[in-house]
Image: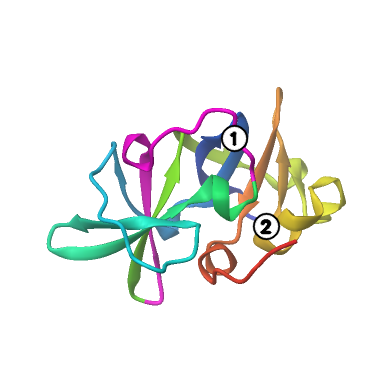
Amino acid sequence: MAEPRQLIGMTVAAQQFGVRIEAVRDILGPQQLAKVPLAPPEIAGVLNLRGRVVTAIDLARRLGIDRDDKRPADQAMNIVVEDRGELYSLLVDRVGVVLTLGAERFEADGSSLPQHWRPLAHGLFRLDDALLVELDIERVLALQPVG
């Protein structure tokens, strides 16, 4: 990684994550979701975004984060990302700012990450006060079991 990377920061259950800004198409407040029968547990439902059906993924469930608060999915913030021409919404607790992070803060070796996060992350950035996990959107959206 030679060039600084721009990421949208987000928080899920007090952990900071980031996705590359070029994957982000929209940031939305809480949305009404329609349930999808027989969907995997990480699929919170679908939402309508300007006439397009968008699959909403509960990022906490996808990452195996056990939450104390069982916040309804329709109260989460939505980060809409695109992968292979399809739109998906990542449900998160809070959306942060755009971060420009240099190579000196990046660690590709994910050995300090929980085992089940490693296949879903490019690596992590050491911030002044926290660690930020850079998610690999393609792998997160593949919905293959982790762990």
Q: Is residue 80 magenta?
A: yes
Q: Which residues are magenta?
A: 65-84
Q: In the shown orientation, is residue 104 left or right of residue 37? A: right
Query: Earlier along the polypeptide chain: callout 2 or callout 1?
Result: 1
Residue 6 percent coordinates (x, y): 52, 47
The circle drawn on residue 125 is none
| Colour treatment of the image | rainbow
**Residue under the image location 49 percent in, 33 percent down:** 70
The circle drawn on residue 121 is 2
Q: In the shown orientation, is residue 19 left or right of residue 90? A: right
Looking at the figure, which quarter contains the C terminus? bottom right
The foreground one among 133 and 147 is 147
Residue 46 percent coordinates (x, y): 29, 59
**Residue under the image location 71 percent in, 24 percent down:** 128
Q: Amino acid at mark 1?
A: Arg
Q: From where the camera sits, is residue 45 visible? A: yes
Residue 121 percent coordinates (x, y): 67, 57
Separation (CA) of disc 2 from disc 1: 20 Å
**Residue under the image location 51 percent in, 38 percent down:** 9
Looking at the figure, which quarter contains the N terminus? bottom right
Residue 99 percent coordinates (x, y): 53, 38
